[in-house]
Every structure is written in C-alpha cells, then in structure tokens.
Image (cartoon, rainbow, N blue to C red):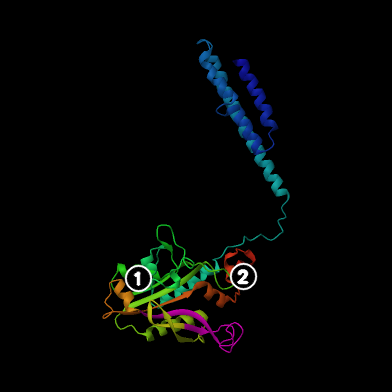
Amino acid sequence: MLKELKQIVVDAEKAFAEAADERAVEDARVAFLGRKGRLTLATGGMKTLDPSDRPAAGKALNEAKKKLAALLEEAKKRVAESGAKAKSAGIDVTLPGRQRRLGAKHPVTAMIDDCVAIFRRLGFIVAEGPELESVFNNFDALNTPSDHPSRDPRDTFYLADGRLLRTQTSPVQIRVMMSQKPPVRIVAPGRCFRRDTPDATHSMNFHQIEGLYVDRDVSLADLKSVLEAFAREMFGEKAAIRMRPHFFPFTEPSVECDFTCVMCAGKGCSICKNSGWLEIAGAGMVDPAVLEAVGYDPEEWTGFAFGMGIERLAMIKHGVSDIRYFYENDIRFLRQFR
C-alpha cells in the first residue's frame, strides 16, 4: 500500500503540473480526489491490512492527502493567474467603457400604463379579470342577443367546456358589479381575442381598456367630460372630441367617440380621410338591462361605460401604420420607443 500511495503522489504531481486550464484541473481532482478517485479507492484498502501495518499506512495516507490537496490549490492558483494575464494582455485601458444597452417597456405596455395613469388621476381604480370567461359574463349579462354575430364561432374562440376567450374586457365590469354595491368607478385594461383575419388594423390578439362609472344621477355629460379630459392628457391640450350616435347592445344611448386627428391637428389628411377626426372609443350609458342582470336597481342607479383599443391608441400616438409591427419582435422597431 505504501508503494501504491507513493505512485499516486507521483502521478498526481504530473497531472496537476500539466493541467493548463480550469477544466483540466477539475479532471485531475476527480481522478485522484473524487469519490471514485485513486486516493479514495486506496483509502478503502485500509481495512484489508494487518492491524500492525495500519498505523504506518494511515500516516502515509494522510501525508498523501495533504500533498494532493496542496497540488490542487497550487494548480488552481496557477491557472487563475495565467487566465488573468491573458485577459489583461488584450485590454487597452485608454478606450472608453462599453455601456450596456438598457431594455425598455414594450410600446403596448407603455400605452396601458399611460392610460391607467390618466384615469387614476380622474378617480378611477384598476380592475382585472380572467381571459378565459363564461358566456354569461361575456355576452348574456351584457345584453347581447343570442343571434348576435359576435356570438358566432366564426368570430369567437370557444372551448369544449362552453367557456370562451373573452372578446372584450367588459366581462370585468360584470364581475365587479356582481361583487360590490354602487358606486363603481373602474377601468379594466387587458388582452382580448377575436377570430379576425390579421391585417394592418386587425389582430386575433389585441388589448383594450374599458371604463365604467355607476352612481346616482350619472349623465352623458359626465361621460363626455371624462373622455375629453383623457383626450387632452393623451394627445395635448388642443385635442377635442365629438360624439356620434351608434348602437351597442350594452349601452343606451350609445355613441362613437372621435378625437381630433393628431397628424393634421384637425385640418384633414390621409390618415383621418380628410375629416380631421379619428375614431377612438365606443361608449354610452349603461343599458338598464345590464344593471338588472347584476342586481342593480336601474331606477336608482345610472352609469356610463366606454372602451378603446390600446394598439389603436399607440398607432395614432406614435404614427405606426401596421398593428402587426407590435408583435413581430423586431428589435429595430422596438428600440424606437426606448
């Protein structure tokens, strides 16, 4: 055994001396000091020795362990020093430092944050809900007729269990109203899904932010004041709005809300089709049938609701011509919003 330990030390000295990098040093360590290394296996042979030979063998074994440990530390230090010299040899200390590129919020996320910040200042709080919804919350409670085109499987993503991917963030309004008594003053930003054919202005996956205010004596004038304040905060003090009659199943009366075209400041251009206006939001007074569906007395409570597309707001604000740019992950495009 003494002869074997002496040979292990000799072989270890050669292996550690020849190790030129960290990987080679680690391989040598495993070969001699690992769980199945040569020194470890030699230690297991102690029990087969004659009791009178064990003291001398134990002493030699301890000396071999110390020697190999010293060889290992020496090799590690030598490799580390040689690596540091190699790295420093190629450095020009007169060169300016390299600054790491900082990431930034995605333009859609940034637009959601901007919208939420504006509505918070107007007294609204943020409410959220699941993207996987029930037919009741997405259609029935919102007074959507059973034969309405939006219910068609060609327009909506249905699951086998009867649930669906929400087509709007309006179900969040239903969830909030069913869980608390008036007054309610919320905005609900989130992702929506529809079976649209992707083009420059449509996507199967998009974002909306919807608002709801329910209280006593809420009027269309309150709705107009909120949207007007939002328009000025988002697009500048000169921004104005106009409301046009429209129809939505869940509001009555319903309006389409246009904002002053930010490209031409209302003078008329190709973007706004020379009208000076851009369609931004759908809105109206909450239909009494919706209030009844959530257990509110429409004789006591009134309210307004509005909804607008986040991507459309971002396209208008930043002059983006195609909604698909937001989802192609082209770094050249996204860097413009840092």
Of labels 1 and 2, the one closer to you:
1
**At 44% across and 62% down in the image, what residue appears?**
158
In this orientation, which residue lies closer to the viewer: 199 or 304? 199
Circle 2: residue type: Gln
Circle 1: residue type: Ala
State the separation of the CA atoms marked 1 and 2: 42 Å
Residue 119 - label: none
Provide the residue designation for mark 1.
141
- Residue 136 image offset from top left, x and y in percent: 36, 67
Task: Identify the secondary structure beneath mark 1.
Answer: helix
In this orientation, which residue lies closer to the viewer: 317 or 204? 204
**At 66% across and 31% down in the image, what residue appears?**
16
Q: Quadrant of residue 120?
A: bottom left
Task: Identify the secondary structure beneath mark 2.
Answer: helix
Q: Is residue 219 above or below residue 200?
A: below
- Residue 84 image offset from top left, x and y in percent: 67, 45
The quarter of the image holding the C terminus is bottom right
- Residue 164 image offset from top left, x and y in percent: 43, 63
Report the span colored magenta: 257-286
Q: Is residue 338 visible?
A: no
Q: Is residue 86 visible?
A: yes
Q: Is residue 316 left or right of residue 189?
A: right
In this orientation, which residue lies closer to the viewer: 250 or 26? 250
Q: Is residue 92 above or below residue 56?
A: below
Provide the residue designation for mark 2.
336
